[in-house]
Each structure stands twice: as C-alpha cells, then as structure tokens.
Image (cartoon, grey):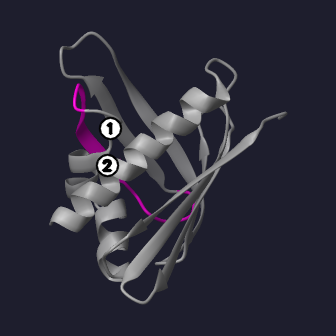
Amino acid sequence: MDTTPITIDVNITATLDKVWDFYTKPEHITQWNFADDSWHCPSAKNDLRKGGKYIARMEAKDGSFGFDFEAVYDEVIPQKKIAFTLEDGRKTIVLFEESHKETKVTITFDAEKENSLEMQKNGWQAILNNFKKYTESH
C-alpha cells in the first residue's frame, strides 16, 4: 500500500499509568475521542491484545454524520506501544514515553487518500489534544 506516514505528538502532565488507562479504557475513550465539541464518541469497545479489535463510534452531535472507527491490534506492549491496522489496511503506531512528570504520546499513522495531509494531521492532533485536556483535568 502506497501511503504517506503522518506523525503527531503531545506531552501530558500525568503519570504513564494514568495516560495508558485513559487512552485504552472505553469509559475514558468516550470522553475524549473527538476533534471538536460538535462531535462525540457515544461508545467504544477495546480488546487490547494482539488480534483484538478496537471499535469507537464517532458521531456529529446533531446526528448528521457518524461512523465506526475500527482497527485490529498487531502488537500491544503495555505502557510502551500499541500498533494496529485500520479496516482499509492503513497502519498506526502509538508510543508512550514517561520522563519526569510528563508522558509523551507519539502517533504515526498512514494517511488516507480522500482528505489533505494537513487536514488529517490537524484532525488527529485535535483528538490527541482533547485527550491531553481530558487526562490532565481528571
């Protein structure tokens, strides 16, 4: 598959334990997994193991649009790395690194062909920033 990788990251003022739990547990995923306040994530399922499936429902709050974001895990190293393949075959790697009082989350994902690289990068970064905001405020 001919794809362009995009990398985004964020530093979160929280322990690695907390960041990992908030990133992987469905009760937290539904609280942060959207790019802006006009969207929400009403449900999430996460079978966090190699071969396990991740499903997050993404919807516009006004009901005008929605989709299931689905992936299958290729590799899970607790509190270090999550690698998965999306339904269309694109790959994603999420890395977690703790230093001092912060945890850095770095995501590298294969771009899709429908939207501009900038739009994709900004959208994924907005979700990651929302994750940071949620994690630091709880």
106 to the left or right of 133: right
Seen at 19% across and 22% down, the residue is 61
The residue indicated by pointer 1 is: 34
The residue lying furthest to the bottom in this view is 100
Q: The residue tagged with tag 1: helix, strand or loop?
A: loop
Q: Quadrant of the N terminus?
A: top right
The residue lying furthest to the right in this view is 2
The answer to the question of whether label 1 and label 2 lie on touching residues, with beta carbons closer than 8 A, is yes
Seen at 27% across and 9% down, the residue is 64
Percent across and percent down for residue 63 are: 21, 14
Q: Residues within 10 Å of mark 1 (few under 14, many from 20)?
A: many
Percent across and percent down for residue 138 are: 15, 66
Q: Which mark is residue 113?
A: none
Amino acid marked by disc 1: Phe
Confirm whether the magenta stretch covers residue 93: no
Q: Quadrant of residue 67?
A: top left
Q: Quadrant of residue 103?
A: bottom left
Percent across and percent down for residue 19 are: 34, 71
Seen at 77% across and 38% down, the residue is 4
81 to the left or right of 57: right
Query: Separation of disc 1 and disc 2 at Cα?
Result: 7 Å
Q: The residue tagged with tag 2: helix, strand or loop?
A: helix
Q: Is residue 13 above or below residue 90?
A: below
Residue range highlighted in magenta: 37-51
The residue indicated by pointer 2 is: 130
